Amino acid sequence: LLQIGVSYNKSITAAQTKAEEAPVDADGFKVEITNSDLNYNKTFTYNTGEPLSVELPVATYKVYAHSDLEKQTYMTEPYYGQEQSIEIKAQQTVDVNMLCKMENTKIALVYATDFLSTFSKCQITIAAGNCVRDFSYDKSVNKDVQNPAPEYWMLEEGVTTIRVTAFGWTAEGNVPVSQSYDYHKEDNSAYKGSDAITFTMRPTANNSGSTTIGVEVELFEEVEGDTVEVPVEGEETGGGETDPEEPENPDPGTGELTMEVPEDIVFSIKDETI
């Protein structure tokens, strides 16, 4: 008899939103059970309040529980998943609790009020490994600039640096300005699923006192079951007054930003053999 008890910590929600949010339900999640040697590959749907019971031959199986969503590089909601290797023995019942964690990384871009009043137009690129997204606004086209809706990126393994590159035009004088920064964790570890990063664009001054583009970065990650804010170090990689290419159709983006990272999800699977 194998019994595994797994708990989950809600601090990831409290630490990042500082507000109450509805609980996340695992109802409808998919559970894949596979064994290549036995050519066994079946997918089940988990229903809340109804333990999933599956009769299996004696063997070791890979069990993967995940959101009932198509996994994509860029998503508008989190993708949860967790995988375990489960050994089934004769005449034994195996109880397994699956703890599903967010597999993607939350990316949020915020335009501070003073940034919008300082720069009438801006193009911003955020790049993390193979993930690259462009954002822009132009107040001559739309004065009511909104923060882009947060996204969830499925990062490749080993991404340690996120680059933010911005081209802006000042409201006074229409002076073109560019700035680029590389950001990495203080310990230089890789960004990963369950990380949540907010980039807040703000005006700042360079060494000569001229107005340029600044970025404030806030990162939360899960560390040993707790959610903590992790120091991020930035390195200026270039910038100054420049002549950036005009955007053809700048898009101010839609949706209100809410820095919410849903809590981890827990449900149970009961495997029975006779």
Image (spheres, rainbow, N blue to C red):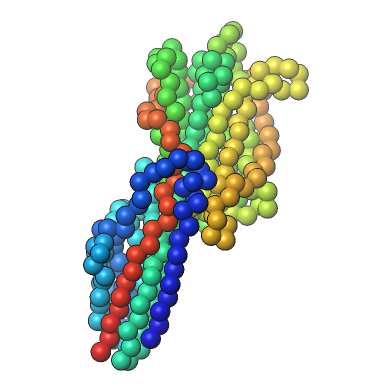
Name above or below for residue 146 compared with residue 231.
Answer: above
**In front of the other: 60 or 97:** 97
Residue at 31% x, 58% y is 26
Query: Residue 195, image x and y in percent?
Result: 52, 50
Query: Residue 128, image x and y in percent?
Result: 53, 45
**In front of the other: 53 or 73:** 53
* Residue 134 in the figure: left or right of residue 162: left
Name above or below for residue 134 compared with residue 13.
Answer: above
Query: Residue 171, image x and y in percent?
Result: 55, 11
Name the quadrant containing residue 238: top right
* Residue 93 in the figure: left or right of residue 45: right
Q: Quadrant of the C terminus?
A: bottom left
Residue at 35% x, 77% y is 95
State the residue lying farthest toward the bottom: 90
Residue 81 in view here: no
Residue at 63% x, 54% y is 189
Residue 229 in view here: yes
Name the quadrant containing residue 6: bottom left
Residue at 55% x, 31% y is 200
**In front of the other: 226 or 168:** 226
State the residue lying farthest toward the top: 173
Query: Residue 137, image x and y in percent?
Result: 45, 22
